[in-house]
Amino acid sequence: MAFGVIYDACVLYPAALRDFLLRVARTGIVRARWSEKILDECFKAILRERPDLNPESLERTRRLMREAIPDCIVSGHENLIDSLTLPDPDDRHVLAAAIRSGAQTIVTFNLKDFPANALDPFGIEARHPDDFMVDQIGLAPGLVVGALLEQVAALRNPPMSRELVLDRLRDQGLIQTVAKLRELSGMG
């Protein structure tokens, strides 16, 4: 059975990374989850940075995310929030969602906001998306490469080459992951 992960808002924000993480989850390697509040944070940040985007299009993306990953929404964790301690109290809802869903990992760029001493009692660790994806490649390289190829094939408006998608993922922080994917696909 796939182990559970919570995707934090910051890893769902960049479009290429979000697409890749969801496609990897759809392979069944991991069971990805998030809460409505995590989605709220993600899409508010997108609109703040990109006010030119159509809110209806973003709502469609949000809906498609829910459809892509069955049972992705964590609920019933709100009563845990006040009892948790993190450096940034605004991140407690993410840890609460991880606890409620039985996740072993929070995938986030904000590692300092999820220190081991706060997560260890719950058997949870925070992982940078690059380290997380390197682990997934180690477990199931063919499935991860397949997720990448599926992502490339789905991009039609505008179409993007595998090299361009890998460049975007690298620019979004997946440096080790992209190096391994290039090595696996003979693009070294």
Image: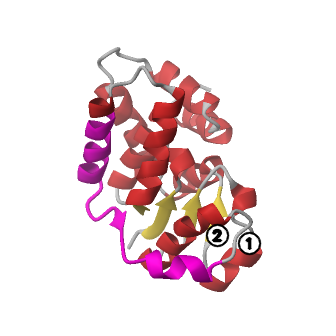
What type of secondary structure mainly makes up the magenta span? Answer: helix
Residue at left offset 49%, top offset 49%: 41
Residue 84 rendering spot, x and y as whole percentages: 63, 79
Q: Nearer the viewer, residue 141 or 76?
A: 76
Q: Nearer the viewer, residue 149 or 57?
A: 57
Residue 66 rendering spot, x and y as whole percentages: 28, 52
- How crowded is the residue under tag 1: few (<14 C-alpha within 10 Å), some, or many (20+)? some
Q: Is residue 40 visible?
A: yes
The amino acid beneath tag 1 is Ala
- How crowded is the residue under tag 2: few (<14 C-alpha within 10 Å), some, or many (20+)? many
Residue at left offset 34%, top offset 63%: 73
Q: Is residue 186 above or below residue 130?
A: above
The circle on residue 116 is 1
The amino acid beneath tag 2 is Glu
Is 162 magenta? The answer is no
What's the magenta region?
58-84
Q: Is residue 29 visible?
A: no
Q: Mark 2 falls on what kind of element?
A: strand
Residue 143 rendering spot, x and y as whole percentages: 40, 49
Give the residue pinned by disc 2: 125
